[in-house]
Image (cartoon, grey):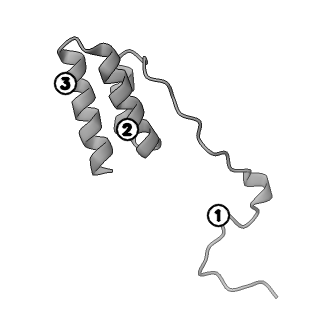
Amino acid sequence: MDLADALCTRARAEAATSQGSKAVRTLSRAARITPWYARVAIVRQILGAAAPIPDLPSIDVAAESRLFDDPWAAPET
């Protein structure tokens, strides 16, 4: 996460120095490392949503019936 944070900072600096395409590439790299990291989305929004959003793996929640069950709960008998 530290690397993604540093890449976000670098992307902001690149954008501020009129290196927009380089900033987009840097931000895309950060998004590949931690696509769930909120700062990546915030910087993407600051840069004008120019960076592509990576494909995230989908989770079929319906198939995972016990996904949110309490792991400390006693089993039903």
The residue type indicated by label 3 comes to Ala
> In this rendering, which labeled residue sits more in front, label 2 or label 1?
2
In front of the other: 47 or 64: 47
Residue matched to label 3: 13
The mark nearer the N terminus, 2 or 3, is: 3
Kindly check if marks 2 and 1 are in contact, taking CB atoms under 8 A apart as contact.
no
Q: Is residue 70 left or right of residue 33?
A: right
Residue 52 drawn at (x, y percent): 49, 24
Q: Is residue 59 left or right of residue 28?
A: right
Q: Is residue 18 visible?
A: yes
Q: Quadrant of residue 20?
A: top left
* 16 to 58, vertically: above or below: above
Amino acid type of the residue that numbered disc 2 sits on in the rendered structure: Ala
Q: Earlier in the sequence, mark 2 or mark 1?
A: 2
Q: Residue at x 68, y 50 (%)?
A: 59
Q: Residue at x 66, y 69 (%)?
A: 69
Q: What is the secondary structure assignment of the residue under circle 3?
A: helix
- Residue at the limit of the structure toward the bottom, as seen here: 77
Query: What residue sits right under mark 1 in the picture?
Result: 68
CA separation, marks 1 and 3?
Answer: 41 Å
State the SS at label 2: helix
Is 37 drawn above or below residue 67 in the view shown?
Answer: above
Whole-angstrom CA distance, mark 2 to mark 1, is 29 Å
Residue occupied by mark 2: 30
